[in-house]
Image (cartoon, helix red, strand yellow):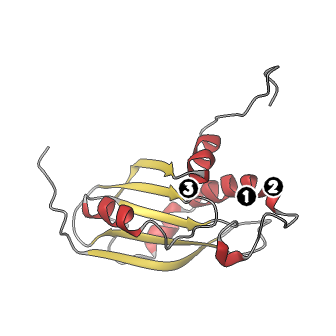
Amino acid sequence: MPSTPLDRRLVSVKPLTVPTTGRSAPLQVKVTAPVDGEKLPIIVFSHGNAWSMDGYEPLVDRWAAAGFAVVQPTHLDSRRNRIGFDDSRFASIWRVRIADLHAILDHLGDILDQVSGLPARADHHRVAIVGHSWGAQTTGALLGARVLDEAGTP
């Protein structure tokens, strides 16, 4: 496979709102992609606790420069939503995070349609879901990982 220059021009579009239900704040995402290239694989990146769609810029820009379209949500636990550990909603935010990723996948075409020129260049058959810290746990849970106690009970 030929190498990809990492000095490519990028485009980032935000905030894009994703339809959801049962969420106390709108689900917003940021899309970052190279301005050129075809058949771009898609990465959905779930942030760690308290971060947002605006974090991880060096990593996301590197992925985009390498030829990926990257979608970053702002989960409900983001600092910008002001839901602290003492908030009654915090105990179930992990479920909302998983629902966020489902919503992004369900509306991926609509999300990418909002970035000029990207829909025809994105490869909807090559989608990776990744995350950092709590985002990695969210991704694992979305893909079927379950936490069990010593007796094997979820």
Q: Residue 144, located in which quarter of the rendered image?
A: top right
Residue sticking out furthest to the right: 88
Q: Residue 8, located in which quarter of the rendered image?
A: bottom left
Which quadrant holds the C terminus?
A: top right
Q: Residue at x 84, y 63 (%)?
A: 89
Sequence-first disc among 3 and 1: 1
In front: 105, or 25? 25
Residue 72 screen position, x and y as percent: 50, 65
What is the CA distance from the residue labelled 2 to the residue labelled 1? 7 Å
In front of the other: label 3 or label 1? 1
Question: What residue did someone put label 1 on?
Answer: 96
* SS under mark 1: helix
**Labels 2 & 1 near each other (Cβ < 8 A):** yes
What is the CA distance from the residue labelled 2 to the residue labelled 3? 21 Å
Question: What residue did someone put label 3 on?
Answer: 105
Determine crowd level at label 1: few under 14, some 14-19, many 20+ residues with C-alpha closer than 10 A. many
Question: What residue did someone put label 2 on?
Answer: 92
Residue 107 left/right relative to 89: left
Q: Residue at x 76, y 29 (%)?
A: 148
* SS under mark 2: helix
Which quadrant holds the N terminus?
A: top left
In front: 70, or 40? 70
Amino acid, disc 3: Leu
Is 132 placed above or below 11 here? above
Is 112 placed above or below 144 here? below
What is the CA distance from the residue labelled 3 to the residue labelled 1? 14 Å
Residue 7 left/right relative to 42: left
Residue 9 left/right relative to 80: left
